[in-house]
Image (spheres, rainbow, N blue to C red):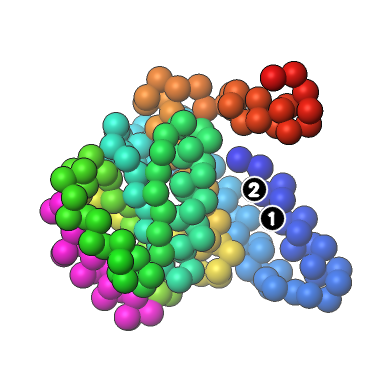
């Protein structure tokens, strides 16, 4: 969960080089939103009031399949990697409209019942993408084991993206706990790094 330590210094470096990609006001909004999320999604908040805990419960033992739109598709991939590292579970990620071109056919498989569909939505998405999400729910919703839909929070792009990323990180943490997995150790990853450095097998 080191994203904040990487993201905000990078913005500062870009700004010092006169390459401002996010306004200061958007950074301020993102920081306020993340601080609010820390309380809303933290361990002290019960599941009834905690979106990340509810998502983890919805995922249960199912395979997470996360889809985002043009803006949130990269966040869907981030969810996939966080779920793999923290909850030690396979997950799949895709982006609309690309998954509509071929992957949608895979939902006809009986294995779809073992999957939980997670849709990452954004209030700024175009009407065309919103319609694709609606049709996706209509066409494959019954095939999936369940559907969860989550919305980005905030006004600026940074706040909206980071709110979804943070929700995914907390969800992966709670899913690990739910499945009886310690989210912190990464023994296979550590072993790979050791081998790549030429260490002991």
Whether 95 is drawn above or below 6: the answer is below
Q: Quadrant of the C terminus?
A: top right
Q: Which residue is painted at 77% across and 23% down in the image?
A: 199
Magenta stretch: helix, strand or loop mostly: helix
Whether 185 is drawn above or below 165: the answer is above
Whether 36 is drawn above or below 179: the answer is below
Alpha-carbon neighbours of circle 1 within 10 Å: few (<14), some, or many (≥20)? Answer: few
- Pinpoint residue 16: horizontal percent, then vertical percent: 86, 68
Q: Which residue is painted at 71% across and 69% down in the image?
A: 24
Q: Which residues are magenta?
A: 126-143
- The answer to whether mark 1 and mark 2 are in CB contact below 8 A is yes
- Pinpoint residue 174: horizontal percent, then vertical percent: 43, 32
Q: Quadrant of residue 186?
A: top right
For this orientation, the residue located farthest to the left is 142
Q: Secondary structure at mark 2?
A: helix
Comparing 33 with 132, the one in front is: 132
Alpha-carbon neighbours of circle 2 within 10 Å: few (<14), some, or many (≥20)? Answer: few
Callout count: 2
Numbered mark located on residue 7 in the image: 1
For mark 2, what is the residue?
Answer: 3
Q: Answer yes or no: is residue 173 visible.
A: no
Decide if residue 121 is on the left or right side of residue 139: right
- Pinpoint residue 75: horizontal percent, then vertical percent: 50, 57
Q: Does the magenta-highlighted stretch encompass residue 139? A: yes
- Pinpoint residue 123: horizontal percent, then vertical percent: 39, 70
């Amino acid at each position: 969960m080191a994203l904040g330590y990487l993201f905000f210094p990078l913005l500062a470096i870009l700004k010092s080089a006169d390459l401002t990609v996010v306004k200061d006001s958007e950074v301020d909004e993102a920081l306020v939103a993340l601080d609010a999320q820390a309380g809303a999604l933290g361990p002290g908040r019960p599941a009834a009031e905690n979106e990340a805990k509810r998502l983890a419960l919805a995922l249960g033992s199912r395979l997470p399949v996360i889809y985002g739109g043009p803006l949130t598709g990269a966040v869907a991939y981030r969810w996939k990697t966080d779920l793999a590292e923290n909850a030690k579970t396979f997950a799949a990620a895709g982006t609309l409209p690309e998954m509509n071109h071929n992957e949608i056919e895979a939902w006809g498989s009986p294995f779809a019942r073992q999957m939980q569909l997670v849709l990452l939505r954004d209030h700024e998405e175009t009407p065309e993408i919103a319609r694709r999400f609606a049709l996706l729910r209509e066409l494959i919703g019954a095939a999936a084991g369940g559907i969860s839909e989550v919305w980005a929070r905030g006004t600026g792009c940074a706040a909206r993206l980071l709110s979804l990323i943070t929700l995914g990180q907390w969800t992966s943490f709670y899913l690990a706990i739910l499945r009886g997995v310690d989210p912190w150790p990464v023994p296979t990853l550590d072993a790979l790094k050791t081998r790549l450095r030429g260490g002991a097998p």
